[in-house]
Amino acid sequence: MITFDRVSKRYGEGHDALREVSVEIDRDELVFLTGHSGAGKSTLLRLIMLMDRPTRGRVLVDGRDLAGVGPRGIPRHRRDIGVVFQNHQLLFDRSVFDNVALPLVIAGFDHREIGRRVRAALGKVGLHERERAMPVTLSGGEQQRVGIARAVVGRPKILLADEPTGNLDPALSAEIMRLFEDFNRVGVTVLIASHDLVLVSRLHHRILTLREGRLVRGSAP
């Protein structure tokens, strides 16, 4: 599903964020990406999302070489990918329903389909009764679940998460990780960047570890 073939990324100031990274993530797999701050985790996710391009090497997603995806093809590519951020990135002047609906509104779905999909996504994260609430009234864990609902409302093939439990206590972190496992069980390929090695090690999924831009662990399941 996701292939990195000797991928390197150097930024303009001469910083090598990734160095000769080669790895394959299979369809329907859940994988953790670990490493110290600045190891290259976010850069790797950005390359999958086409928010950045590699300096060298190839990135393939669902069999497609992303080097062949031009600016006009980026929105279509991203429709197959849901993204969960550490800080939720919710719109606090809009309701929970409207936050989750936003990707569908942008994609041009009709009103009835938006309603069905949003309520289904909120049901999956246990927030079906909070659709009219404003984000400021929710706990941190609930806000993160809204972010997850927004990421999956478009029914993506791939779910990426960048430090999704970074601001949560251990109990809430475990709850959020169980949600990711639930989505993985129904066929979503999941890649989670996390520094919480204790929690990650308990879940018994493949772990990829980056150190100074190099993959030092996890080339095989």
Image (cartoon, helix red, strand yellow):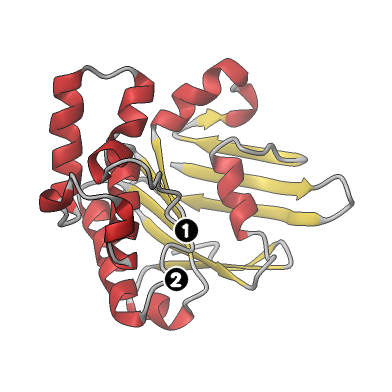
Q: Amino acid at mark 2?
A: Asn
Looking at the image, residue 190 sits to the left or right of residue 43; the answer is left
Q: Which residue is mark 2?
A: 167
Q: Going by the picture, which residue comes out furthest to the right?
A: 14
**In which quadrant of the rendered view does residue 80 lie?**
top left
- Residue placed most toward the observer, 63 or 41: 41
Assess disc 2: are there few (<14), some (14-19) or many (≥20) residues with their C-alpha within 10 Å of its C-alpha: some
Q: Which residue is mark 1?
A: 87
**In which quadrant of the rendered view does residue 71 lie?**
top right
Considering the image in quadrants, where does the C terminus appear?
A: bottom left
x 38%, y 43%: residue: 158
Q: Are marks 1 and 2 in contact (CB under 8 Å)?
A: yes
Could you tell me residue 119's position as x and y percent?
14, 40
Distance Cα–Cα, label 1 vs label 2: 8 Å
Could you tell me residue 66's position as x and y percent?
59, 30
**In which quadrant of the rendered view does residue 201 lie?**
bottom left
Give the mark nearer the N terminus: 1 vs 2.
1
